[in-house]
């Protein structure tokens, strides 16, 4: 996408965030319900087809455009940005690994917004080490029979289709394979919504598979290639999370600047006190550094997967989001600890960016491994 086109996308999404998403965020947080009207608005802007090739009704956006969209949406509401990025992970897997019949069957409707996609990799006892998963998809004639449980599934209650990772032989670590499973398949049970510190409007559930039968053609990768496929897609996913962390940090910085300019103590705005001015200076510097790292990772990923660059961006941007949100609450003083101001939500939401799609500790391990090569 050309720079002028990308600028237009950014302006369009920014306007939607200002006029639609930010006003809806508080109600969604209070109710704990995902704002479906906002999702429909994303579909109208073609954002639910961001990762879908144009041939199947999508946008086929490049990495930098994806970063721009994720940053702007997270500035409005991280729950919505997270839901969209997971939907994009699912469509990316189908587009990259599915055969033509699966692409034609699922991608046009998913590009239009529904069914919503989910990505089922983690398990209750296999989070950072997916090779330890125990979910099994056993071949039975022209079908696979799936048994097991997945955890921390974003869009779990809303999804219509799941990209699932399972072993074809539970006893063989090298048999992890990727499958497509419709949520209405008999034997698939969606667990209750998790009660979380942040992302309260995002539905996070478990998925239980009790002898779920799917056609053999729903296998997306060759047997044993599932983890390789997951790591390939997650490189782009981590860049998206980095962009979301930048957007959230940006929102916290903007709110802190506004409050500091308006709040007076000792006869002048608190922004004029050196202690606060220096906080804002450090926050602004780290937000810019995180944005540059993220955009650099996106550019590198266009030229071929660069897991270390993605991990650097995700690690630095997510930790920056936590620090900047913390300082934004501090600048607001007691008011920042109440739900009257959005910085309270930013503070709660920021933490998850250091956890999902690979913790900060995992990102540092990837970076260190790259340095040893």
Image (cartoon, rainbow, N blue to C red):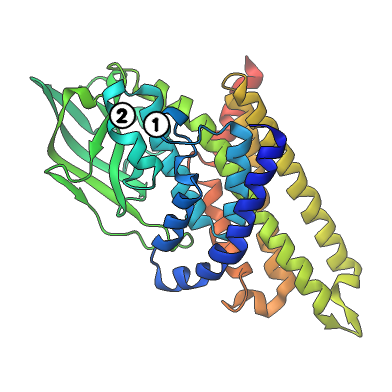
Q: Observer-nearest residue: 120 or 56?
A: 56
Query: Which is nearer the eye, 148 or 141?
Result: 141
Mark 1: few/some/many CA within 10 Å (<14, 14-19, 20+): some
Image height check: is 186 above or below 228? Answer: below
Within 10 Å of the Cα at label 2, are there few (<14), some (14-19), or many (20+) other Cα atoms?
some
Q: Residue at the spot x=23%, y=27% of the render?
A: 218
Residue 267, given in percent of the width and then of the height, sits at 92, 85
Q: In the displayed structure, does residue 175 sit left or right of residue 49?
A: left
Outermost residue toward the left?
141
Could you say which is closer to the camera, residue 57 or residue 152? 57
Q: Position of residue 359 (x, y in %)?
A: 52, 41
- Image mark for residue 104: 2
Q: Residue 338 appears in which quarter of the rendering?
A: bottom right
- In the rendered image, is residue 119 in sight? no
| Left or right, 58 with reference to 130 | right
Q: Position of residue 13 (x, y in %)?
A: 60, 52
């Amino acid at each position: 996408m050309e720079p002028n086109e990308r600028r237009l996308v950014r302006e369009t999404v920014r306007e939607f965030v200002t006029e639609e998403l930010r006003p809806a965020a508080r109600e969604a947080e209070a109710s704990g319900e995902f704002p479906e009207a906002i999702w429909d608005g994303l579909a109208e802007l073609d954002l639910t087809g961001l990762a879908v090739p144009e041939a199947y009704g999508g946008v086929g956006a490049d990495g930098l455009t994806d970063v721009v969209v994720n940053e702007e949406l997270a500035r409005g509401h991280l729950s919505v940005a997270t839901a969209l990025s997971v939907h994009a992970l699912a469509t990316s897997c189908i587009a990259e690994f599915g055969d033509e019949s699966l692409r034609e069957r699922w991608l046009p409707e998913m590009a239009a917004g529904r069914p919503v996609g989910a990505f089922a990799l983690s398990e209750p006892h296999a989070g950072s080490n997916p090779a330890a998963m125990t979910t099994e998809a056993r071949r039975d004639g022209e079908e696979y029979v799936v048994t097991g449980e997945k955890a921390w599934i974003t869009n779990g209650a809303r999804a219509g289709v799941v990209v699932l990772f399972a072993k074809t032989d539970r006893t063989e670590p090298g048999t992890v394979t990727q499958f497509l499973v419709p949520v209405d398949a008999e034997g698939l049970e969606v667990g209750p919504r998790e009660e979380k510190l942040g992302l309260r409007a995002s539905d996070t559930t478990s998925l239980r598979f009790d002898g779920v039968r799917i056609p053999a053609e729903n296998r997306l990768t060759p047997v044993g290639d599932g983890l390789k496929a997951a790591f390939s897609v997650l490189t782009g996913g981590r860049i998206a999370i980095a962009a979301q962390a930048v957007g959230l940090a940006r929102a916290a910085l903007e709110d802190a600047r506004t409050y500091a300019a308006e709040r007076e103590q000792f006869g002048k705005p608190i922004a004029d006190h050196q202690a606060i001015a220096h906080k804002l200076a450090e926050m602004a510097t780290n937000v810019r550094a995180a944005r540059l790292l993220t955009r650099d990772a996106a550019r590198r990923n266009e030229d071929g997967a660069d897991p270390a660059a993605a991990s650097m961006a995700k690690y630095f941007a997510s930790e920056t989001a936590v620090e900047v949100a913390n300082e934004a609450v501090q600048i607001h003083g007691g008011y920042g600890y109440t739900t009257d101001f959005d910085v309270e939500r930013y503070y709660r939401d920021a933490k998850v960016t250091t956890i999902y799609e690979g913790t900060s500790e995992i990102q540092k391990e990837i970076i260190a491994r790259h340095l040893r090569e």
